[in-house]
Amino acid sequence: MMWLTLLYSCTGGAAVLYALYRWVIPSIVQYHAGLTLIWYETIVQRMLNTLTQSTQPQRILGAVQKNATRGDPRSVVKAIDQYCRNKEWAMNVGDEKGCILDSVVSEVNPSTVLELGTYCGYSTVRIASLLPPNAKLFTLEFNPHNAVIARQVIAWAGVEDKVQLIEGASGDWIPKMKEHYGVKTFDLVFLDHWKDRYLPDTKLLEECGLLRKGSVLLADNVIFPGAPEYLEYIRGNQRYESCFFKSHLEYTKALDGLEKSVFLG
Ligand SMILES: C[S@@+](CC[C@H](N)C(=O)[O-])C[C@H]1O[C@@H](n2cnc3c(N)ncnc32)[C@H](O)[C@@H]1O
């Protein structure tokens, strides 16, 4: 009888813990960006890393290999979104802001794109799949482990011909883009790396003559984690025409958005 009571208590306790982990806490933290990061990045991700002896990028690649069709970029995007909505939050631009990104890419119809911050290649695949023939997307990632995974995600999506993944820091590579890759100017720049680099890298792009009249800068996460110095610079600058797209932090209901800024020359 005592053993039976103990068994019931253990099973009941485990069920409560699972419900908290799987539904209760996620449904609460999704309304608060800071709590989302604390819960997923410092608790869930570390726990999964230990339990599965893998990294988040490896798990995202696994979800792609399991659920996406080779050569079908949209299925790759869908597989990552499903994984990150249902299993574990990740810092991809995500499905909701991804639609805004798609519409800007389609509107600009760029020949040359620069993406700052590749992570696992989610936004890279989104952008590359919408590019016209002969267009090129340069994507910069300074974390070698992320770069290794991103190459495989990009190859799985079948967009590797359109993508040049450069491993290194934005501050080092932006000044070398003309000489090393023969880039004249970028039609579109997607800023999605560490937020304290948005402003210095924008100034670097200007100094290096990599922006032309009409070049579009699209900056993610301008509300959360936020890039106040960048916003102040870009919004108060007569050389840019800027507008804000209100949205939500990836895979949550917390406020975030993208800032689109056209360089006026
Ligand atoms: C928010 S994630 C990028 C997400 C990706 N754009 C997407 O939506 O799928 C930011 C990435 O930028 C990289 N990163 C941060 N600062 C960087 C820098 N200065 N140069 C190159 N990569 C950087 C980080 O290692 C990280 O993988």
Image (tube, rainbow, N blue to C red):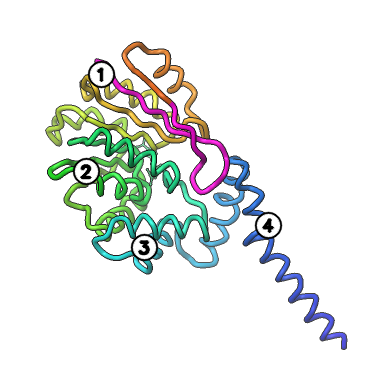
Q: Hey, what amino acid is under mark 4? A: Val
Q: CA distance from mark 2 to mark 1?
A: 27 Å
Q: Which image quadrant shows ligand 1?
A: top left
Q: Is residue 81 left or right of residue 161?
A: right
Residue 254 is covered by the magenta coloring: yes
Q: Residues within 10 Å of mark 3 (few under 14, many from 20)?
A: many
Lower sequence index among marks 4 and 2: 4
Q: Which disc is residue 64 wearing?
A: 3
Q: Residues within 10 Å of mark 4 (few under 14, many from 20)?
A: few
Residue span colored magenta: 244-265
Nearer to us: label 2 or label 1: 2
- In the depicted view, which residue is nearer to us: 169 or 74? 74
The local secondary structure at tag 4 comes to helix
Specify whether tag 1 is near ligand 1 (CB below 8 Å): no
Q: Which residue is mark 2?
A: 131
Q: Hey, what amino acid is under mark 2? A: Leu
Q: Residue 103 falls in which quadrant of the image?
A: top left
Lower sequence index among marks 4 and 3: 4
Q: Is residue 160 left or right of residue 85?
A: left
Q: Which disc is residue 236 wearing?
A: none
Q: Hey, what amino acid is under mark 1? A: Glu
Q: CA distance from mark 1 to mark 3?
A: 39 Å
Q: Is residue 53 above or below residue 7?
A: above
Q: Is residue 221 left or right of residue 143?
A: right
Specify whether tag 4 is near ligand 1 (CB below 8 Å): no
**Residue 171, image x, y percentages:** 31, 30
The local secondary structure at tag 2 comes to loop
